[in-house]
Image (cartoon, rainbow, N blue to C red):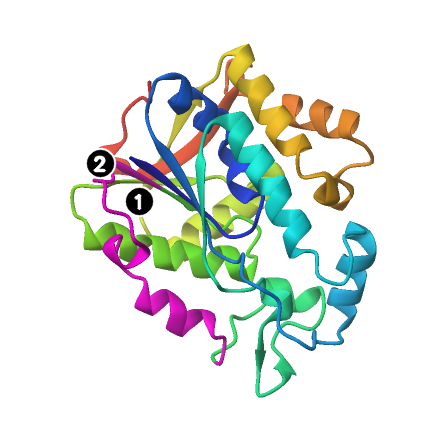
Amino acid sequence: MHVFLSPHLDDAVLSCGGTLAHLHEAGAPCLVVNVMAGALPQPLPDTPIVRELHARWQAGADPMPVRRAEDARALAIVGAQGLYLPLPDCVYRMHNTHALYPDEASLWGAIHPDDPAHALLDALATFAALGITQPVSTLYVPLGVGQHVDHRLVRAWGVRLAVSQPNVRLLFYTDYPYFREQQHIDTARAELGLPLESVWQPLTDAQFAAKLDGVAAYTSQLSTFWASEAHMREALAAHFRDENGRFAERYWQIAALTHKMG
């Protein structure tokens, strides 16, 4: 089984949707673990970032049912199954009624020591704890490009999961849209502190088209990065290419283990 760790409901398809379609076509089972996909606290934290996001998404006071439905459609398109953990997005996480990440700047800053994500992810540091009983061949983890707190939390957790099963192949995916700046990639690699080299997953036109259709299924999220669905399709077609201009998705693994993906 191939397991993809997705900090939020869209990250795996945004960064790895073509690979998911490729694996599905090859008959390989894929599971996307949506980490920050839990129910929202009540009452919601009354913060600038929550007000801004809810206004942008237009998915009601509790957007999670809409977002989960979008994710189910997207995963069906690329041929993957979904697992949803009970941790809410960082913008909703609190400690003693205090919002831990109240504004845009806090999303890219220090991970709060009182973040409940620490305890939950520590308790789920093996595949068995996640209820995954099939052998895992490859684990896909966000590189943390862009420094979002949730992506960095999931990156550290993913490394622990890989250590718990020594035979698993660990691949770090290059988080979209943050990888558009080379500096963001360099910062993430330096923070991880491992000797990494890139490896490309080539994509057919049909696999890339499935990725685009999967991303388009996240209707509430499109306005976060693009002016329209057409703009999204143009942007992804420009960004997801290898050195030879072919459709591809980029991964990173420990340099001594690097080899071509098939």
Q: Residues within 10 Å of mark 1 (few under 14, many from 20)?
A: few
* Secondary element at tag 1: loop
Magenta residues span: 114-139
Give me the residue at 56% from left, 19% from top. 208
Q: Is residue 105 magenta?
A: no
Q: Is residue 229 above or below residue 244?
A: below
Left or right: where 241 falls relative to 132: right
Q: Residues within 10 Å of mark 2 (few under 14, many from 20)?
A: few
Which quarter shows the C terminus? Answer: top left
For disc 1, the marked residue is 195
Residue 123 pos. (x, y %): 31, 68
In the rendered view, does 161 fall on the left or right side of 141? left
Front residue of 262 and 85: 85
Q: CA distance from mark 2 to mark 1?
A: 8 Å
Q: Residue at x 26, y 52 (%)?
A: 127
Horizontal side of residue 58 vs 243, given as left or right? right
Asked whether the beta carbons under mark 2 and mark 1 sit within 8 Å of each other, the answer is: yes
Horizontally, is 183 left or right of 161 in the view?
right
Find residue 30 and report its image quarter.
top left
Q: Residue 258: horizontal and vertical position, in percent?
A: 27, 31
Vertical order, 40 against 78 (above or below) = below
Q: For residue 256, which numbered disc appears in the image?
A: 2
